[in-house]
Image (cartoon, grey):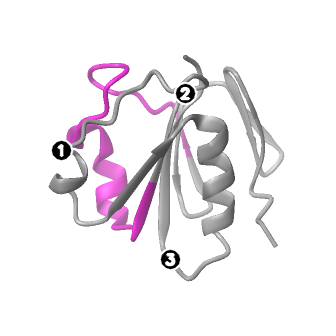
Amino acid sequence: MVSNFIEDYSFGKIVIKGELYSDDVILLGKKVIDGWWRKRGHRVAKGDLTKIIEYDPDVLIIGTGNSGRMKVPSELPKKLEFEVESYPTGKACDRYNKLLQSDKKIAGGFHLTC
């Protein structure tokens, strides 16, 4: 059975545990941190992931936006001590919900537009 933690996603909004968010979010397991900003907007860098790095997940799921415009540089996973998966945000939400059912410690960074 797939988790229902992330209940809905559409361009510019995500519903998590019954709460609507319209800014990008970081997820640390089942904790939500609203208002995730990246120094270079549509490009993820290690410095944008401080809270996630401190959380020390097994897997980081990155939602790259509705059409996948946010870039995750190929060298980024090599700079981190955990697995990184990136997908357009709709698919990333499904993957995150699925991984919540595993024994892995997961985190997420979700871009809600573009």
Query: Where is 17 relative to 101, above or below?
Result: above
Q: How far is mark 3 from mark 2, CA to CA? A: 24 Å
Residue lying furthest bottom:
103
Looking at marks 1 and 2 on the same chain, the residue that comes earlier in the sequence is marked by 2
The magenta region covers: 33-60
In the figure, residue 10 lies in which quadrant? Answer: top right
Image coordinates for residue 76, horizontal then vertical, percent: 22, 45
Q: How far is mark 1 from mark 2, CA to CA? A: 20 Å
The N terminus: image quadrant: bottom right
Of the pair 23 and 79, the residue shown nearer to us: 79
Query: Where is 68 relative to 92, above or below?
Result: above
Q: Amino acid at mark 3?
A: Lys
Q: Is residue 55 magenta?
A: yes
Residue 104, disc? 3
Residue that badge 1 annotates? 75
Q: Amino acid at mark 1?
A: Glu
Query: Where is 110 relative to 10, above or below?
Result: below
Q: Is residue 82 magenta?
A: no
Neighbourhood count class around disc 3 (C-alpha, 10 Å): few under 14, some 14–19, many 20 upward: few
Residue at (61, 78) in percent of width and height: 102
Residue 22, disc? none
Residue at (45, 33) in percent of width and height: 36
Looking at marks 3 and 2 on the same chain, the residue that comes earlier in the sequence is marked by 2
Image coordinates for residue 105, horizontal then vertical, percent: 48, 73
Image coordinates for residue 90, horizontal then vertical, percent: 67, 38
Please report contact status of discs 3 and 2: CB closer than 8 Å, yes or no: no
Residue that badge 2 annotates? 65
Neighbourhood count class around disc 2 (C-alpha, 10 Å): few under 14, some 14–19, many 20 upward: many
Please report contact status of discs 3 and 1: CB closer than 8 Å, yes or no: no
Of the pair 22 and 72, the residue shown nearer to us: 72
